[in-house]
Image (tube, helix red, strand yellow):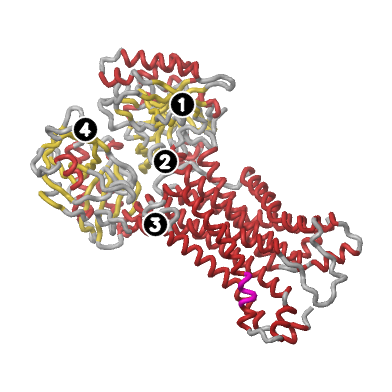
Amino acid sequence: MTDWRYAVRTLARSPGLASVAILSLGLGIGANVATYSVLRAVLLDPLPVSAPQELYAAGWNSHVRTRGILSINSTSYHDDNTGLNYGSNFSYSLYEQFRQAGGDGLFGFSYAGSDVNVTFGGHPIVASSLLVSDNFFTALGVTTVVGRPLIASDDRPDAASVAVLTHGFWQRAFGGDPAILGHTIHVNGSAFTIVGVTSRGFYGMSKGGPVFRPSDLLLPLSVEPLVYTRATPRSLFGADDRWWLQVMARVPSGQMPAHLETALNTRFRGTLAASSSPALRAASTGEIRMFAAPRGIDSFARGLRQPLLILSAVVGLVLLIACVNVGNLMLVRNVARQKELSIRLALGSSLWQLVRTVLAETALLAIAGGLAGTLIAVWGARALVSTLIAQSVRSAVEIGVDGRLLGTVAAVSMLAALLFSGVPVLRIVRGGLTPVLKQTAGAAAPRLTAGRLLIAAQVAISLPLLVGGALFLRTVYNLGRVPLGFNPGQLLLFHLDPSLNGYDADRAEHLYGDILQRLAAIPGVQSATLTDVVLMSRLQNNWTFTVPGSEPRNVKFARIGPAYFETFRIPIVAGRTIGVQDHSRAARVAVVNETAARMLFESDPPLGRRLTMQTDPPADFEVVGVVKDSRYTSPRDPMPPTVYLPYLQTTLGRLGPMTVVLRSTIPALSLSGLVTAAVADIDRTLPITDLKTQVDQIDETLGTERTFMRLLITFGAFALLLASIGLHGITAYAVARRTSEIGVRMALGARREDVLWLVLRQVIGITSVGVAVGVPAAIVLTRLIRASLYGVEPADPASVAGAIAVMTLVGVMAGYFPARRAARLDPLSALRYE
């Protein structure tokens, strides 16, 4: 206890050192814990169900290309050994066969119709539904906190429509009211009775993503015709060529999934081989594989795995820099306290007692840094989640103060304490504290070789952060200068889906027409249009088109409304654009961009030519216009061949969801209230979602690059600050140690410039050693982020040179001030200095 009290008093006498050390450790610890918390929540945490490690997902792969099978809201599973991707979806008839082979441990679920319009008390809400089999709750071990789960009697065509709410949706939409049981809600216009609420924390089978969102409602499979409004035929149960069910199974611990895999393969191949459909018979040559799925549908992992792993390495460097800096400060401080420690040795203190004193001080700093790091970790983790995951994508990733977070803080704090206390303690143990009681006045203090090496290491570690920040700065700059082919300024976007309210094609056509007229009349709106593809959203439509006499080509396409090209400011090259005359009863027309015209028609003039979309049955379109190329999914991607079709001529029975786009003469978001009111005047039960500007959409698409740029620049600035503090401390100590020598030199005629250079060359030498080590390290490490860069190479000379220049300038400035004080010393005072 005495050591702790002494450590507190000692640190209190050096508030500047303690503050710098605590803030350095707090940022280093907080950044690491925040990153690990997000990495754990996104990539490691399993589903909140019973024994998630026992869950396996079924996937299929065909060895031949199959056409004619439509997979609805599917994902894929990757086999690292073969490099093959396996599809996740199956038809209902296949699911029934699998269920017979797998028993009660095998269950199905579907994201078909995941977006639904929920109306309760007259207020529409867009929610996410999950269709589940009758044994879903029992197979997963999901319980309810209110009411009951779904049971087998609920999953019959003649059963009353019932729903179970997830706990999060119950809290958000109904305020956690237990009286909600038995109440009726309307889902896509159909009445459902609420029978239960799941346990806290359960979010369905996915933590989130643009397709597989956390679930709000759990519904029986039998209600599919009521919630999936875009199917042909009306119900998916009898459509063997529509694959819409995902299949998982529980394999008890100690058993291997190979037996189940064999049984499913037998059912899979036998069922498809007996089909009358050529597409299904072709698929029978494939195979079923079982993939471990403790995290359910890991939709976030693919896009965020590499960024989070890279970020983990970056924050690890930050912690190392902080520890090196604190260790150096402690080393300088212990050397400055050498007389005190020598007196304690002379008075009978043991070497172990001195070590305990240093360890108590470092432990106090680690504890204080851990407390500061906890606050930074919670705030930083939430900020990191909101930055990495687009605002338009709802997720179940939550970061809070819990036992795991506090335990991680404690572990990282202990690691930090061991790192930064190592050199000072080692110096004491090896007898680096020479008693100074026998030293004569004016004897020089010991050289601080270890401190200089630590500063050089700090410079070397900081340099890759600076180079990385410069590379991402150039990447974001390059992406911002990419020609998009359209003008994103003053564009406002929002999403509508009238099919969720039961609109057929004719009603939806009139609805969209009325909305466009009403919006065009709003003051400040120049034009309004529709599209089913939001540009720069990474989402895309691909389809096969053919031209008479040519091979089928797969190209991008978009369903658009009148004034589309005028709204986006995409120039017309030849012919005309799509207008109000291109309605559902008019002759089918198409507009192509220049790249599509070259790909499909080569050197022939495209105007007036026929273009066939390979639907069932095929649809012919006449090309009436050619427009300039524009970006489609991302500024990174090249201009793709794109076919534009009137949205009213490609309905396939239903119009479905569309995005409305407005061009305004005033700030776009200022129109949001008027837009919402205009839609509500036409249909008050039709909710608006994803309201944003086109510029915001581009920022979301470039979110990863911008995040890395900001973080690396922030951490690089932090590393520079710590390096400058360390260099300043080492230089100040060197000046104090050599004060008498400086006085002699000045008495013998040395000029102030000579003294200034005498001190600065030490700083330049330390910085040069760090740069010599750091540049090769930076060139090697930045290769890891090559895939995230754009228009710049990892070993970009300008970025490396800029980082070296900044590091050198900061180092020289940090050493300049103590060097200037040394140059201004009075020779007589310096000679009398002890």
The magenta-colored residue range is 757-762
Q: Can residue 281 be seen in this view?
A: yes
Which mark is drawn over residue 209?
2
Q: What element carries label 1?
A: strand
Where residue 358 appears, as percent x and y from the top left, is 77, 58
Q: What amino acid type should be assigned to the residue bearing mark 1?
A: Ala
Label 3 to label 1: alpha-carbon separation = 39 Å
Q: Is residue 585 visible?
A: no
Label 4 to label 2: alpha-carbon separation = 27 Å
Reading the image, the residue beneath label 1 is: 57
465 horizontally vs 744: left or right: left
Which of the two labelled residues, at mark 4 and mark 2, occupies the earlier sequence position?
2
Q: Quadrant of the C terminus?
A: bottom right
Reading the image, the residue beneath label 3 is: 476
85 horizontally vs 675: left or right: right
Where residue 20 appears, as percent x and y from the top left, is 65, 64
Frontmost residue, 748 versus 221: 748
User: On screen, 203 above or below 638?
Assistant: above
Which of the two labelled residues, at mark 3 and mark 4, occupies the earlier sequence position?
3
Q: Does the magenta stretch include residue 259?
A: no
Where residue 407 appears, as percent x and y from the top left, is 65, 45
